[in-house]
Image (cartoon, rainbow, N blue to C red):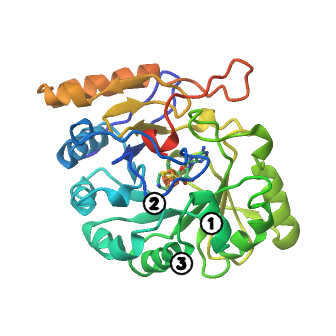
Amino acid sequence: MDSRQLFDQFGRRITYLRMSVTDRCNFRCTYCMPAGGLRELGRYELLTLEELARLGRVFVEEGIGKIRLTGGEPLLRHDLHILVRDLSRLPGLRELCLTTNGHLLAEQAEILARAGLMRVNVSLDSLDPEKFKRITRGGDLRRVLQGLNAARAVIPGPVKINVVASRGFNDDEVLDFARLTLDPGYHVRFIEPMPMSPHASWERGEVLSVIAIQRQIEETYGLEPVAGNFSLAGPASRFRIPGAAGELGFIGAVTDEFCARCNRIRLTPDGKLRGCLMADGEIDFLRPMRSGVSDEGLREMLYQAMRVKPERHYINEFYFIRPLRTMSQIGG
Ligand code: SAM
Ligand code: SF4
């Protein structure tokens, strides 16, 4: 079946759903969570795998072509492969991806690949075991590297590494990460740290601009732009070191206004549809679903979400207020 097309009130075509399957996490990254963690959702506050699959189906029928499973740490969700299997069978879905911290990936890569997972992004902010432990508050770099290797062996699409770039933390590792696009050919994306809930630390002075990173790589290796499908690719500007198998992506969430190209919506683990990371307006799908809402009712709620998706974020305006939820609670 040909899926329909979904547009928001500003004429942006919405094709990409980030679906969070849990708010729990086995790391405590400093820019994402407080050291002591956060109150976790109770079992009945979380969408079930069946509810997630149903929403995935309805949204894909309405024009979503790409779904990314995220969290919290999505690999902590029991039986995630069942959701992957159900979503991967949706006829209109062109991309089914996962973002993970990689800690449990070596064990799960194969079952997820067999269930139909097409791509994986692994978040990795340092290649130094001590620094990695510090930023994640306890993470084991060795396990994440094993997860990357396992993903490369069994998951079809190129493996992407997401690097949150912080001044004074990993600015000295930019070229080390860039070299991973040459060998073994990972895609690497640098992301500016964003001001999320006050429960997570953020200082404007720590934002290492992606322009500065790009310049540093360009001066050493040279860079050429990659032609891409921007309607599915999202906010990253994409380049390649000449001859590299992997790409480099730069997401200037703070310094670049990419909102005009925004193609995404987010489903929080407690079933709220959110038009923007930075805006707390949400539409609740969980309660209506548990009160028997029809598929037609779900479609109406999706259209309503299209009407309230904001035009842009206001991070750089003096009146900006940080969102109430952390990235782990929304689904980064
Ligand atoms: N736990 C998984 C992981 O870390 O990949 C998935 C969820 S995590 C919230 C998704 C992405 O959000 C990660 O790449 C993480 O680095 C990023 N992230 C979290 N807080 C952020 C912030 N304040 N600014 C920018 N990126 C952030
Ligand atoms: Fe967990 Fe991912 Fe947040 Fe780190 S960024 S604390 S791994 S949810």
- Residue 142 tag number: 3
Three-letter residue code for mark 2 = Thr
Q: Which residue matches tag 2?
A: 100
Residue 25 seen anywhere in this rendered image of the structure: yes
Distance between mark 2 and mark 3 Cα atoms: 15 Å
Residue 95 seen anywhere in this rendered image of the structure: no
Which sits in the foreground, 310 or 230? Answer: 310
Q: Viewed as shown, does residue 311 lie left or right of 96? A: right
Three-letter residue code for mark 3 = Arg
Q: Which residue matches tag 1?
A: 132
Q: Viewed as shown, does residue 74 lie left or right of 320? A: left
Q: Residue at x 62, y 66 (%)?
A: 132
Q: Residue furthest right?
A: 219
Q: Is mark 2 within 8 Å of ligand 1?
A: yes
Image height check: is 82 above or below 158? Answer: above
Residue neighbourhood size for the residue with mark 2, other residues' Cα within 10 Å, grouped as few (<14), some (14–19), many (≥20)? many
Q: Of helix, strand and loop, which one carries label 1?
A: helix
Which badge, 1 or 2, comes first in the chain's sequence? 2
